Amino acid sequence: MIKAFVYIVVFVFLFFGAPLVQAESSPRSSSEIVRLSWEAANRGDAKALSALVNEMLMNYEGKAKALAVALTNFPPRSKVGDYKVMSDVATVLFIKSETLMHQGQDAEAKKEFKKVIKQYPWAQTFDPSRGAYWSVAEKSQDSIDLMEGKDPLAVSSVKVIPRTVPVLKYPGQDVIDWTKYGNFLNVGTKDYHYQITDQAGLVSAIGEGIYPNIADVYKDPGYRKALKAGRLKGSQWDFVNTTDLQAAFYKWVTAPESWGVRLYYIGEIFEKAGMLKEAIKAYDALIVNFPSTIAWTYWQTPWYPGQAALAKIQYLIRIHPELHMDFKEAKIRIVNTEDAHNYQTITSPGILRKLSDTEIAGQNLNWQPVKMPLGKPVFYSGQGQVRFVKYDSGHWQLLVDDKPFLIKGMSYMPTKVGQSPDDGTLVDWMQEDDSHDGVITAPYESWVDKYGDNKRHADEPQVGDFQLMKEMGVNTLRIYYQPSMKADKEFLEKMYKGYGFKVAMSNFLGKYAIGSGATWSEGTDYENPLHQKNMMAYVRQMVMEFKDEPYILMWVLGNENNYGVASNADKKPEAYYKFVNEVARMIKSIDSNHPVAICNGDTLFLDKFGKYAPDVDAYGANVYRGNYGFGSFWDEVAELAGKPAFITEYGAPAYGGSSMNYAQAQQAQSDYHKGNWLDIFYNSAGFQDGAGNSVGGMTFEWLDEWWKDYSPALHDTKADAIGPFPGGYYFEEWFGIFGQGDGSQSPYLREPRKVYYTYKELWNS
């Protein structure tokens, strides 16, 4: 998942005196040499790095070259480990080349980079902070381009591949009345089943390519034409992000996957093609027939397409009221999620129907949910200025001075182009006075490039990020407390008085080894008494420093610690959540005015959080599931934790690769955010069809950060990790609500994207 406010990444290791000479007779592992090489490079120890490079080549170069010649592409994820030695050798040579470049030895650096590209084109290095691999050859070429002053792949120059859409010879009906063709058995139980009684009638009604109608695809002349032309060659997974949507449709209908998985991707293909009725029909067929389907994500975590399909229908009907559809009483509940091989599914497929002419005539095309009374307060989590309240309806609210407060938050880390934590050049944005005029740059001196020409004109005054955020409707900033960038109390007080922003003050709680005293390679151990003592003291310091400040909204512990990365919370979740609870109790002993929340990665180990961290007031999580929002997230938190919930990170890139141009990508980013926010909003207190436990969310992020894919002077457009986004990949340097243009006017220029105006409407209405 994406990591907001991560200032220490995989390449910035802490040196702790590891010997450079191996005492044992057996050689050091290639992984250990890579680790030590990064450390030597970051210390600027050229002599140590040279020795490590020689050691790597002497012990592993022969094997690495043999592995390299056997590849014609990147190995599949299941086989990546088989080629680790090759990638480690390439990585060390890359580190050597980068060091030469930073020393100004461009000619020698280019020569070494080109060797890496030629000898190891399929080498890749894993970045645990993002859970993804990056290509050593690609980053080598980026560095060459940087030295030669080449313009990185500009968005305007990306060649967009034309899109084809499915043309159905046998389209069927718009909405299926399943009761005409079969029986719903055991609704609302683990034994739910839909029994087809009129197969022929259902096949005719459902239309081509949607279960149980596969025969019509084989009769479709378009299918035969695509097959003959070779457009269907390859795996169905090669067709997930293609722009040839017609070929993708045929490929997925005939794919050797379970029908549950097939129907989900068929629905997505229709959705991308703008064939929304067909998309809803495919998602509905999945819910009715295959709600128990399980699949696996890129990170090998369980995924339940039925729940996602249900959320997709709700999203499409909500965003497109012109469809005149209604979907009620649908719910898919997964029981025993901690055991993906012995889970149970409790299904109520709901009723999807088309509105009557009378209903359509009276319908307001701005979709409106059904509201409900909250009832009386039955429980308060905290008794101070900020607290949560639960009503007898089961719904929750966050109260600030006894008034409801819905978090409209922003992940704010404005980073100047060229700065990076990798090389220690990242400047604290609360201290950065780029023009040396005594005014902090990003919050107060940024300006909007309304002409998109990377030049400031007379009618483009300095307005500042804080004013832009206030106009957008932001009421909360997410800020991390840490040694390298100490939060400035005077600065934050001025911000609060001038703009009203609350602060969710956060502590990494040992993630990335921050605050525990552990080294990166050692990692935080949540059962280690010394690490616990250090973290407890670090959190106490934060709370004592800020507890009386009027802008504090709450304390947030961690940042996806349950995923691991320089900590063992993923391996010892019980120990982690028990420690979190101890920290929460400590905080409450010295501050009764502000609640305590956690920042998890999605719902992994949610059951253990619910069991071992009862003193934490709210469940926050970084969640990236898709344009439809967060699906079962709210219900899962209600069931397994019984807490109010909020999203600590969500968002999408404003770049979609070759699948769309920049304008289309901006629109897709805006639509993604809108779908996510509406899901947050309609699951907050007072809406009949929502979970009622949402207290808001924090968008990721305000401004593009160019360092995320390693080269801080390049706005990288290469695909990295697969993700549930419009272009199919993270494109992690493009998540900003604002862009930085071509980078020449950073840190001042703000390029507004369509999503900014979408939020101005959503958050101010």
Image (spheres, grey):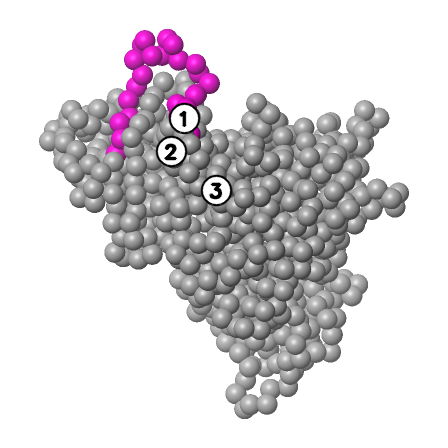
Residue type of the residue flagged with mark 1: Pro
Q: Position of residue 703 (x, y in %)?
A: 66, 41
Q: Which residues are magenta?
A: 349-374
Callouts 2 and 1 close, C-beta under 8 Å: yes
- Please tell me whether residue 10 is drawn above or below residue 154 in the rendered image: below
Q: Residues within 10 Å of mark 3 (few under 14, many from 20)?
A: some
Q: Report how far apart the C-alphas of labels 3 and 2 lie in the structure.
A: 14 Å
Residue 103, image quadrant: bottom right
Earlier residue among tags 3 and 2: 3
- Please tell me whether residue 456 is drawn above or below residue 40 in the rendered image: above
Residue 189, image quadrant: top left
Q: Left or right: 288 with respect to 548?
A: left
Q: Left or right: 346 with respect to 89?
A: left
Q: Residues within 10 Å of mark 1 (few under 14, many from 20)?
A: few
Q: Residue at x 41, y 26 (%)?
A: 373
Q: Position of residue 102 (x, y in %)?
A: 75, 63
Please say whether residue 274 is visible from this viewpoint: no
Q: Residue at x 38, y 35 (%)?
A: 392
The kind of secondary structure element at disc 2 is: loop
Label 1 sits on residue: 373
Label 2 sits on residue: 393
